[in-house]
Image (tube, helix red, strand yellow):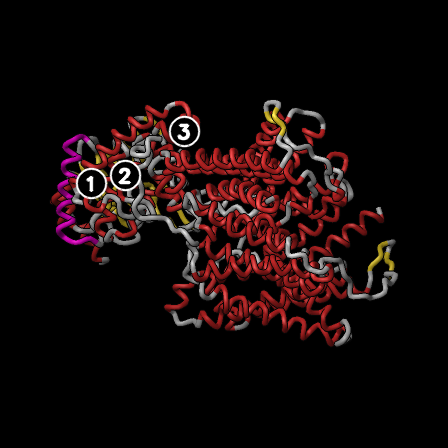
Amino acid sequence: MDLFLHLCIMILIYIIFALSLNLELGYTGLFNFGHVAFFGMGAYASALFTLHHVPFELALLISLAIAGGGGFLLSLPSLRLRGDYFGIATLGFGEIIRIIFQNEVWLTKGPMGLPGISKPTLFSYRFTTLPQYFILALVFSILSFFILRMVIRSPFGRVLRAIREDEIATEALGKNVFRFRVKSFVTGSILAGLAGALWGHYTTFISPSDFTLSETILVLLIVVLGGKGTEWGPVLGAILLIFFQESLRFLRLPAEYTRYLAPLQQMIFGTLLILLMIFRPEGILREKGKTKNVGIETGQ
Amino acid sequence: MLELKQVNKSFGGIRAVSDCSLEIKSYRITGLIGPNGSGKTTLFNLMTGFLPLDHGEIFFKGKRIDGFLPHQIAEFGIVRTFQLARIFPKMTVLENMLLAPPRQIGEKLVSLWLKGKRIREEERKNLKKALTLIEIVGLSHLKNQFAANLSYGQQKLLELVRILMAEPQMILLDEPTAGINPSLIRKMMELILKMRDAGKVFFIIEHNMDVVIELCDWVFVLDNGQKIAEGKPEAIQNDPRVIEAYLGV
Amino acid sequence: MEYLLQSILNGILAGCIYALFAMGLTLIYGVLNFVNFAHGELIMWGAYFLYLLMEKPIGLPLFLAFIPALLFTTILGLGTDHFIFRPLRQANRLTLLIASLGLSFLLRNGAQFFWGAEIRTYGFEIRRGMRFWGVSITSNQVAIIIVSVVCVALLYLLFYKSRLGKSMRAVSDSLELSRVVGINSKKTIRFTWVIASILAGLGGILLALDTNLQPGMGLINLVKAFAATLLGGVGNLWGALLGGMVIGLVENLGVLVISPGYKDAIAFGIMILMLLLRPMVLLGSKE
């Protein structure tokens, strides 16, 4: 039962993480290959503030602001670039943030990592046990899902999709493409920060090696496997991949094999990405031709 | 209404547009013709801010507009189409239409929280208008299809009616009839004339002389980036300079 | 003063290596029109192939091992093109980039699978360098400079004197057009991969000779190569050479003023600075 709850919590956290990337990659067409940076910023900020006795509610808000602010600052220079340059700028940013976590020892304790992150207390209710944390993660992921759905189905989301399809035509219709992209990127960064904060308080120990390219690849794979640009794709992808990853962790292999297990699993992820792109780039769920009339029948 | 003064643009030493001055007056359809490579599309790109000017000034209703970004110029009321129709392939025909209205309340993230009711009203209003417009051009039965599934001619029609959703004062069309079949051309011309009567100003690049003669009230002729003639279409047709430019004598 | 001279020398050394990376990256970009995210892993595998050949049980000496190591890198480069990028030639950009990122990840973890994540060296004894004017330089480092200069000279001859080089330039101007005038673009593309792989492998080997090997070395060097490319103007071979030099120098002079832990971040900083100073026009880049 504990194992099952653990699995569910991880899936829920990764659903939030994947939804945030889907907004950028799936709907806006932004090639963000450094999404882990914002996950890490959320995790570190929230952990550090609570370790310094800031109440969780406030620490969470601050960490979301930090992740969003980081996204804003990065987006200003790099969102002027065409797609693949933006991809490499974000990829580099992901590495730099990790290097900062590693080097600012006075703040982050460097490679040693931050132990003893407290379980969150929300409005004087403590989420310590697994079932309690499950509820917390569930509430936040449902909230994220519906907020993003509202955003995507709104006229705002319609502009984002138009930018993905043809930025020049969107600009010619009087939409400030740059500004819309920045908003999408910042929103995505904030939600990634939320996922990171929840993850940090769940594992109670974080270190720079938790925020490497592997995390970006995992969340990217979740989004493209499930179906980018769909509402349920990231949810489906997170369930499949996190289940796969976490069950490998509980295989209880002899110690001499575990050295091979991690790279092997990553190799599978890399291969899966390549095969998906060659044979089914749209993922499991694909965007449908018939869309609901935006925001009208659904009563948003 | 729109005035170009001494506009210049070169690409790597080649002058695409040189010392071009022209004035487009309200309440009519103005044509822009000229041989291939004479700088017509470049002129469009300069007017809509997609390319920066080297020299010169552009005024719209007395206000200087060169130096502004494309989306700002669209906000001033000058909206364009492209030579190859630019529709949003993985959005439905209706979504293509609903995207176009300017300054929608629902395009602001904050108002999604605060102004839900007004956004719904606005959407309903725009939807009604969009449905009327696609009815006129006969795309109603395709309204929930991805725009990618339309024929090329239908895509060009969609691009044209989409522009009308954008509430423009002046409409620039880059070869609206290129590559579409005669019955659709007829439909398109009727729509353009109807919109002119409703007070829209058109500036049209067109190769099909029959269309030019039937539609345009005034024509500019461009050759090698320079304006070589202007006048009523019938007069232009017989202008020796124009004949020379086209035949390359 | 000596410290400064030494830093400049180290900067030139690093710059030579980065220039090799950047020229390979920009060649692929010029001909195939996408940023190959797996370029860093070609660099890394080049270095590991040499390691494989020099270690037991093969145990070849360096001067015998490096030719087959470059050959293996080239086969790897051609293989990735044949099995991954060729089927995606007509695919949209996002698909192509995600595939190349996936490939980068696969190759990186492949190396980790065989050799583990730890830092390795080729196991040469650390020799005292020769000293000139208080600046020390090892024979390996002399070799780095010579090899880089030879590479650049060969590239120059290739590009401006040979037919194949001319067709590469033509293809990079326009794939469509070169098809029309009958340049065999398949052959040209293959040839481009050969050159880029050799440059990557050679650079990787030189870097590992000067420093060490590690499966993660590809990613950060990709960022550096890209920053160099951006500095020199994308698709511009000689710009890439110059950009690489600048990155190498700034990096090594930079650690005089900031913490060495941030050495790898400097290239990224330069990249962002470039973007801020020379903001490319948002639109029209496609046309």
The chain that hosts pointer 1 is B
Q: Does the CB distance between marks 3 and 1 fall below 8 Å?
A: no
Relative height, residue B54 to residue B12 (above, below): above
Q: What residue sits 16% from the left and 49% below the top?
A: B184
Q: CA distance from mark 3 to mark 2?
A: 18 Å
Q: Element type at marker 3?
A: loop
Q: Indicate the amino acid at tag 2.
A: Met
Crowding at dot 1, Cα within 10 Å, few <14 / some 14-19 / many 20+, comes out as many
Residue nearest the viewer, comparing B27 with B9: B27
Q: Is residue A46 visible?
A: no
Q: Determine which residue is flagged by label 1.
A: B134
The reply to the same-chain question for discs 3 and 2 is: yes
> What span is in magenta?
B180-199
Q: Indicate the amino acid at tag 3.
A: Lys
Q: Does the CB distance between marks 2 and 1 fall below 8 Å?
A: yes
Mark closer to the chain start, 3 or 1 = 3
Crowding at dot 2, Cα within 10 Å, few <14 / some 14-19 / many 20+, comes out as many
Relative height, residue C83 to residue A270 (above, below): below
Q: What residue sits 49% from the left and 70% below the top?
A: C188
Name of the residue lying farthest toward the front: A1
Q: Element type at marker 2?
A: helix
Q: Is residue A164 visible?
A: yes
Q: Which percent across, then down, holds residue A33? A: 55, 48
Mark closer to the chain start, 3 or 2 = 2
The chain that hosts pointer 3 is B
Q: Determine which residue is flagged by label 2.
A: B97
The reply to the same-chain question for discs 3 and 1 is: yes
Q: CA distance from mark 3 to mark 1?
A: 27 Å
Mark closer to the chain start, 2 or 1 = 2
Q: Determine which residue is flagged by label 3.
A: B108
Q: What residue sits 59% from the left and 72% below the top?
A: C75
